[in-house]
Image: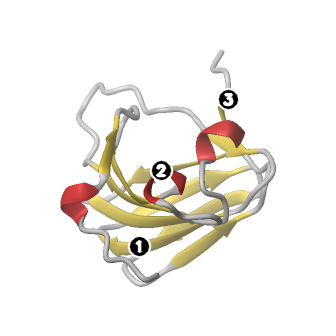
């Protein structure tokens, strides 16, 4: 049965350096997808940027709603603008940072109902 999931029902996640709302996931009854709305704020002077992470067995697709940023990945640096999408392969370390003057808003799609089981932060030196 189809179901409407509102932003008001989204689960607020306590993730470093960003606001993340999990709109669709296994917790909401999905069998093969997670959808998150992510807001990356404008970096503040002296603020230490967060480090990269990776998803060991699944891809991530990010769609830029607004703002500008850059995804830093094992394979290179990718500037992002509104309307752009980036597909991150499984296992590739990456982090997306805001490079603009307004919040960077992303929709992040994952082909699994629970990304916590396969997402790992890269230890920082």
Residue occupying the point 66% across, 65% down: 111
Quadrant assignment, res 75: bottom right
In front of the other: 70 or 27: 27
Q: Secondary structure at mark 3?
A: loop
From the viewer's perspective, is the residue at label 1 or at label 2 nearer?
A: 2
Image coordinates for residue 31, horizontal then vertical, percent: 62, 64
Left or right of 118 on screen, residue 24: left
Residue visible at 43% across and 57% down?
Answer: 28
Of badges 3 and 2, the one in the foreground is: 2
Label disc, if present, on residue 122 of the rendered structure = 3
Which image quarter holds the C terminus?
A: top right
Whether residue 102 appears in this view of the structure is: no
Estimate the x, y position of residue 12 in percent, counting from the top left: 30, 43
Mark 1 Cα within 10 Å, few/some/many (few <14, many 20+)?
A: many
Q: Residue 27 — which label?
A: 2
| Residue for badge 1 | 64
The Cα–Cα distance between marks 3 and 2, rounded to whole angstroms, is 26 Å
**Residue 27 vertical position relative to residue 4 in the rendered view, above or below:** above
Relative image position of residue 84 (x, y in whole percent): 48, 80
Query: Farthest top residue?
Result: 125
């Amino acid at each position: 049965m189809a179901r409407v999931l509102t932003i008001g029902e989204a689960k607020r996640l306590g993730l470093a350096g960003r606001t993340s709302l999990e709109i669709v996931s296994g917790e909401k009854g999905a069998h093969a997808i997670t959808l998150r709305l992510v807001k990356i704020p404008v970096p503040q002077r002296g603020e230490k940027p967060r480090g990269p992470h990776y998803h060991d067995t699944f891809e991530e697709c990010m769609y830029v709603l607004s703002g500008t940023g850059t995804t830093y990945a094992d394979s290179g640096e990718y500037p992002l603008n509104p309307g752009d999408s980036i597909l991150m392969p499984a296992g590739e370390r990456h982090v997306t940072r805001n490079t603009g003057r307004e919040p960077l808003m992303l929709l992040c799609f994952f082909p699994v109902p629970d990304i916590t089981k396969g997402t790992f932060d890269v230890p920082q030196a």
